[in-house]
């Protein structure tokens, strides 16, 4: 029995070296190495004022097969790469020492190149793009299932911004494995200061075909969960109603904000504004009947400011009501109080951007994305809606942060878990629902996902990759207009785990609301308060 156990545990990975570098990388009898010569890439030096610096001299590179160590002597300092096979893992330890007087702003290196016997599966390899991770609120564990085995490229430096993975193909099923400190969604790329040394740890982990990723890289998932712990507490998982009160399709001179999709509505005259308040409360009673029929915990108004300006779509800032929608400003307090008295939570849509008069046309408004603290901006909007209307549900549209890149161009990145935690600390009694989440964002938010299959859709439940890190994570799933019948089993399973479903409450949409009720009946655990 002991001999049998030893045979089962025997490593299938074999690695060999020669005087140039790696000479063989074989798993389960399949050779995967294309070239094992270490390839240093771009090294960008900048001086104290950010000006690019070029140092005289050339690189000298050697490899010691006995210690499996590549050493590079460069004008700016030294680089050392050590390969260490351990069981079915090839560890790669990279040390970069900056001995110059300038800062290494960008550093790149490629420890090896691999060729798979067939196009890998596991992630979208067929798109011919890079298959990389940058460690931003996530782990980097990239599986390549090539039929006869699985190779997972892992960045062991969990939590440190660093891009690592496979380049776009350099040949048929051939990829360069590369690391770079140039991270596209970072506001400040990692740098190596003068006189300092940085260490990086990577690994190629191998397993049998079909081995689930948690069995290969579960330790990295645990590291992320420990570094960014789960803290979201929202016991009520009943559905939430979506309310849309306007559309820019039905704008008229008398109804410039498209209220109630009614081109005949008058909100300009004094009489018209008074009638608007009555109409709003009539709509509220109708909406409440739908919310009650769905056993909803609350509702979210996507466009409390109306939709007068097509260029900004959802405004996401109730503070501007007197200027943008005075008729709603006069009626909104009674409207929200009506739902609260009925025992429902209330909510609105907010954005991290700021609404300002358009520079080109001061009579119009536009989004301002930069030059202010966007977390403080959202906090002020939440404060306003909480104090005025008692809101606790906040859908965050376009949940990205804009910043200037090194070249002066504007770029954007997803809001980080650390930033969401900062906002949640200011408002511990609300549910944050970002449109675009990071994996670690689920630790503090309940992100919005859609079932309908479009660019960011196709989600029936919280992704398994997220649950691998945060088993208690849940999402706000909008199944409307998606393949709800075909994926009902997945949606029910998600509701049982705690996902919350959205439904349209601004009209009796029984074609979609009926199956949502059925799903909640089957996944009864999702109806707990």
Image: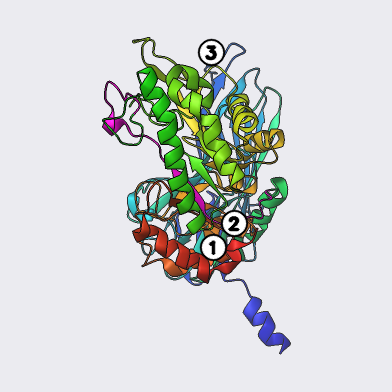
Numbered circle sitting on residue 51: 3
Where 380 falls versus 152 (above or below)?
above
Q: Mark 1 or 2 closer to N-term?
A: 2
Picture coordinates of residue 514 (x, y %)? 41, 63
Picture coordinates of residue 414 (x, y %)? 52, 36
Q: Disc 2 marks which residue? A: 237
- Please tell me which residue is depicted at 54% across the width and 54% down the height of the picture: 296
Q: Mark 1 or 3 closer to N-term?
A: 3
Q: Can you tell which quarter of the image residue 528 is in?
A: bottom right
**Numbered circles on residues, count:** 3
Q: Mark 3 or 2 closer to N-term?
A: 3
Q: Disc 1 marks which residue? A: 495
- Circles 1 and 2, Cβ within 8 Å, touching? The answer is yes
Picture coordinates of residue 97 (x, y %)? 67, 31
Q: Quadrant of the N terminus?
A: bottom right
Where 4 falls versus 182 (above or below)?
below
Residue range corresponding to the magenta coloring: 232-257
């Amino acid at each position: 029995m002991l001999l049998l156990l030893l045979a089962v545990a025997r490593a299938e990975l074999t690695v060999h070296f020669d005087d140039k570098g790696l000479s063989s990388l074989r798993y389960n009898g399949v050779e995967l190495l294309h070239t094992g010569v270490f390839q240093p890439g771009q090294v960008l030096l900048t001086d104290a004022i950010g000006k690019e610096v070029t140092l005289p001299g050339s690189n000298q590179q050697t490899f010691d097969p006995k210690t499996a160590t590549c050493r590079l002597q460069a004008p700016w300092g030294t680089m050392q790469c050590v390969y260490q096979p351990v069981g079915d893992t090839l560890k790669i330890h990279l040390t970069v020492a900056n001995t110059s007087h300038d800062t290494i702003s960008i550093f790149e290196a490629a420890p090896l190149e691999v060729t798979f016997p067939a196009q890998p599966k596991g992630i979208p390899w067929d798109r011919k793009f890079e298959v990389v991770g940058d460690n931003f609120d996530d782990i980097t564990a990239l599986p390549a299932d090539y039929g006869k085995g699985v190779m997972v490229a892992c960045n062991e430096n969990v939590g440190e911004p660093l891009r690592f993975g496979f380049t776009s193909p350099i040949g048929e099923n051939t990829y360069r494995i590369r690391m770079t400190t140039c991270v596209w969604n970072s506001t400040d790329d990692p740098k190596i200061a003068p006189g300092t040394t940085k260490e990086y740890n990577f690994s190629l982990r191998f397993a049998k075909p079909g081995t689930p990723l948690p069995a290969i890289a579960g330790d990295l998932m645990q590291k992320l969960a420990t570094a960014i712990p789960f803290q979201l507490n929202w016991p009520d998982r009943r559905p939430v109603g979506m309310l849309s009160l306007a559309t820019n399709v039905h704008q008229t001179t008398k109804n410039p904000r498209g209220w109630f999709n009614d081109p005949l509505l008058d909100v300009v005259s004094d009489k018209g504004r008074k009638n608007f308040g009555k109409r709003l409360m009539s709509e509220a009673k109708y909406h409440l009947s739908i919310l009650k029929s769905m056993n909803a915990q609350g509702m979210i108004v996507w466009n409390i400011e109306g939709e007068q300006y097509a260029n900004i779509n959802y405004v996401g800032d109730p503070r501007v009501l007197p200027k943008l929608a005075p008729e709603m400003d006069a009626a909104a307090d009674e409207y929200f109080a009506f739902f609260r008295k009925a025992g429902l939570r209330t909510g609105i849509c907010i954005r991290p951007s700021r609404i300002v008069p358009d520079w080109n046309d001061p009579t119009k408004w536009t989004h301002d994305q930069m030059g202010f603290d966007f977390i403080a901006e959202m906090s002020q909007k939440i404060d306003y809606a909480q104090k005025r209307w008692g809101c606790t549900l906040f859908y965050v549209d376009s949940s990205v942060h804009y910043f200037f890149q090194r070249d002066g161009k504007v770029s954007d990145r997803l809001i980080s878990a650390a930033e969401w935690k900062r906002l949640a600390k200011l408002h511990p009694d609300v549910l944050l629902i970002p449109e675009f989440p990071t994996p670690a964002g689920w630790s503090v938010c309940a992100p919005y996902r859609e079932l309908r299959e479009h660019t960011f859709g196709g989600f029936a439940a919280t992704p398994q990759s997220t649950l691998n890190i945060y088993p208690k994570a849940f999402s706000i799933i909008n199944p409307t207009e998606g393949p709800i019948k075909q994926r009902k089993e997945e949606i029910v399973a998600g509701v049982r785990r705690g996902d919350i479903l959205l439904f349209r409450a601004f009209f009796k949409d029984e074609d979609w609301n009926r199956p949502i009720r059925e799903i909640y009946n089957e996944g009864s655990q999702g109806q707990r308060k």
